[in-house]
Image: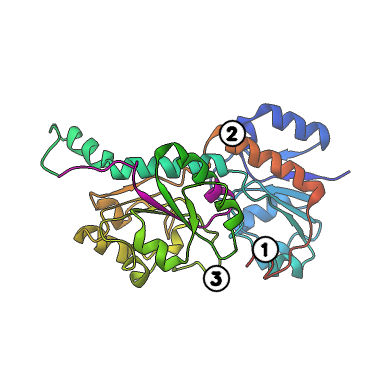
Amino acid sequence: MTKVACVTPYFDFFPELKEELSAKYPGTKFRTDRKPMTEDALIDFLKGYDAALIGLDRFTDRVCASLPDLKVISLCSAGVDHIDPVILKKYGKKMYWAAGINKYSVSELAVSFMVFTLRKVHFFSQILRRGEWKGPIGFASDLRGCTVGIHGCGYIGKEVVKLLQPYGVKILVTDRVDVSDFARQFDNVKQVPLDEMLANSDVVTIHLSRNSTTIGLYNAATLDKMKPGAVLINCARGSMVDEHALKERLESGRISGAAFDVYHIEPANGNPLLDVPNFYGSPHIGATTRDSWGAMLRSGIKGIEHAYVQEPGVYPYD
């Protein structure tokens, strides 16, 4: 009988899934403390168990070496960039992760950020809280009629394309793989090189995985390739954008607005971007809907039986 321990504490919010998991794997151990676990706490919690259902917990060399009985690590998370496949393979530990399980929630947030930023809703909310009414800030913009650039046309990027259809926008997609077959399904979608997308988009939204090719991709030089006055949306990973360079361009108006759900360092309390009036930030809430969390927990349950040894350099580790 497989002994299962749930490091992720969110099963308490889904009693039906907790019951399902307990019935399938009697004696499953659940954690309810939602504070980040230290290496020692993680080792103590998982000692003697065969399979772990985890969130964003990190399995370092020391953690894996200390848990010889642990054979399966099943992820209940939207991303996989916190897992090192080299370490897992070294200790023969299998892993499971399902791509795109949060695609609806993140794509909806990204489109709402587009409208939010173009309409300067954050700024207007701030002046209202100060007891003011409107103010001489110039006109906001409609999303309708804009050109939207989507950098990364995977599960989430494709959903963004679908959600944008009623808005009457032109869509330029950039991806390292050929997605022209998908683009041809729509009259308003075209796959183009990155520089062309940046130069012609009123809105740029990032939907890339975090890996060695994307970390720091939106540096000062890349930001300067964006159309003057464009807005930048990031619901992917914060490490892709040079936040200091973005702050300078927001303050100068070179980039007219930005909305981020992710940051280089999280929690992002005290991030200087949060002091810029034309920047809107949320605390990594892209997947924090009941639907997304239910899907992620179900994926974790499935992964106990479907995990496999990960290959470094092979998707999703590329």
Most distant residue in the left direction: 136
**Callout 3 touching callout 2 (CB < 8 Å):** no
Residue 257 locus on image (x, y percent): 28, 52
Q: Earlier in the sequence, mark 1 or mark 3?
A: 3
* Residue located 79% across and 58% down the image: 308
Residue 291 numbered mark, or none: 2
Q: Secondary structure at mark 2?
A: helix
Res 103 quadrant in image: top right
Residue 265 locus on image (x, y percent): 43, 59
Q: Nearer the viewer, residue 66 or 233?
A: 233
Quadrant including the C terminus: bottom right
Residue 212 numbered mark, or none: 3
**Residue that label 1 marks:** 315
Label 2: few (<14), some or many (≥20) within 10 Å?
few
Looking at the image, residue 190 lies above or below residue 103: below
Looking at the image, residue 133 lies above or below residue 115: above
**Residue 192 visible in the displayed image:** yes
* Residue located 77% across and 49% down the image: 51
Extent of the magenta region:
138-158
Q: Earlier in the sequence, mark 3 or mark 2?
A: 3
